[in-house]
Structure formats: C-alpha cells, structure tokens
Image (cartoon, rainbow, N blue to C red):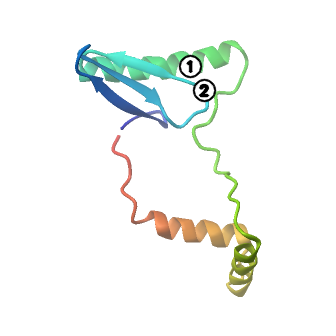
Amino acid sequence: MMEYKGYYANVDFDDEAGIFHGEVINLRDVITFEGESVDALRKAFADSVEDYLEFCAERNEEPEKPYSGKFLVRVEPELHKTLVIQARKNGKSLNTWVSDALQKAAEDIPRPVA
C-alpha cells in the first residue's frame, strides 16, 4: 500500500507487461497510475493525485476528502438499545461511546506503511 497526501493506493504487478499499476482506494472518484519501476510508480502516484487536485481546483470543486470522519452503521434495534444504555451508564453520548469502542478495537490493527 502507498500513501500520498492522505490518499492510499493498492498496487499490483503485471508480470507479463512488466509494469506496476495502482489505484487510489479511499475515494469514490477513480485515480489510477502505473510505472515500470518503484520510483516511476511513486512519481506517477503523486502526479495522479496532484492532477486530481488541480482538476478539482479548475472546476471550483472541493476534492473528495479521503475520510470525512462520518460513517453510517446499521444494527439490529435490540443492539442499538443495548449500546445506548451502555453509553448512558458511562455518561457518554452514543456517538462518543461507539467512537471510544472503535478506537480501542483499532489499537490492535496494524497501520498502513507509508
């Protein structure tokens, strides 16, 4: 995995063509790039992200943020009730309680290497 300015990309290698190709994974917009070496791939990735940012600026549009900090999770009503009760027992909002629980769970997940 590669990272540039908060954008993350997965990379594959096509052995037959002898080329690396990648795609930014944390956007709805599509950003792809390729290169014949690791250095060329890194440059192509950065260039593609910069092109995307310039394109957005030219159109007076905000570039899509890789992560907004908001996401919707649907759960069964009984679980929803249980979570609200636990949050209130701990003197927290449901949002804060869930965020804290997710933070604790994420501590054991390896971070992507830039």
- Mark 2 or mark 1, which is nearer the start of the sequence? 2
> The disc labelled 2 sits on which kind of residue?
Asp
Residue 85 on image: x %, y % = 74, 83
Residue 66 on image: x %, y % = 57, 38
Q: Which residue is denoted by mark 2 in the rendering? A: 29
* Residue in front for this viewpoint, 54 or 89: 89
Identify the residue at horizontal 69%, vertical 77% (top origin).
83
Identify the residue at horizontal 45%, vertical 27% (top origin).
23
Quarter of the image that includes the C terminus: top left
Residue 99 on image: x %, y % = 61, 65
Report which quarter residue 22 is drawn in.
Answer: top left
* Residue in front for this viewpoint, 62 or 89: 89
Please, what secondary structure does the residue beneath circle 1 have?
A: helix
> The disc labelled 1 sits on which kind of residue?
Tyr
Report which quarter residue 68 is drawn in.
Answer: top right
Quarter of the image that includes the N terminus: top left
Identify the residue at horizontal 29%, vertical 17% (top origin).
40
Q: Report the side of 45 relative to 85 (left or right).
A: left
Rendered position, 98 above or below 24: below
Residue 59 on image: x %, y % = 71, 14
Q: In whole angstroms, how far apart are the C-alphas of marks 1 and 2?
A: 9 Å
Q: Report the side of 14 relative to 63 (left or right).
A: left
Q: Which mark is residue 52?
A: 1
